[in-house]
Image (cartoon, grey):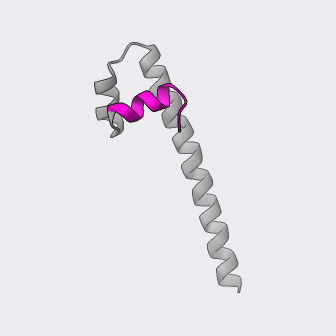
Amino acid sequence: MEILTEAVDALRQAEQAVAEATRRRDDAVRQAIGDGVPVTAIADRAGLSKARVYQIRDHRR
């Protein structure tokens, strides 16, 4: 049972790290848009679609 508890704890920590990294990425995308960087350039650099960049800009999903 201890192995399960450790695995669940590790997963929760990883999920928190992903959530924080996603928040930082989204903030950076919004900042880049605010700075006038073309959406295509942001999408290419971040490995996102242009549609996803617009979703992030608009705080959707």
Residue 17 placement (x, y as % from top left): 58, 51
Q: Is residue 45 above or below residue 17?
A: above
* In-front residue for pair 43/5: 43
Work out whether 26 lies above or below 10: above
- For the point 71% across and 83% down, which residue is it? 2
Characterize the magenta stretch by its predominant secondary structure.
Answer: helix
Residue at horizontal 36 percent and vertical 36 percent from the top: 46
Give the left or right position of residue 3, taking residue 51 as reference.
right
Residue at image x 53%, y 33%?
60
Q: Nearer the viewer, residue 14 or 53?
A: 53
**Residue at coordinates 58% horizontally, 47% vertically from top-left?**
19
In which quadrant of the rendered image does the N terminus lie? bottom right
Query: Which residues are the magenta region?
Result: 50-61
Q: Position of residue 53 (x, y in %)?
A: 40, 31
Q: Is residue 28 above or below residue 13?
A: above
Say whether residue 55 is magenta. yes
Using residue 7 as the reference point, say whether residue 38 is left or right of it: left
Direction bottom: furthest residue: 1
Residue 47, x across and y down, in percent:
33, 40
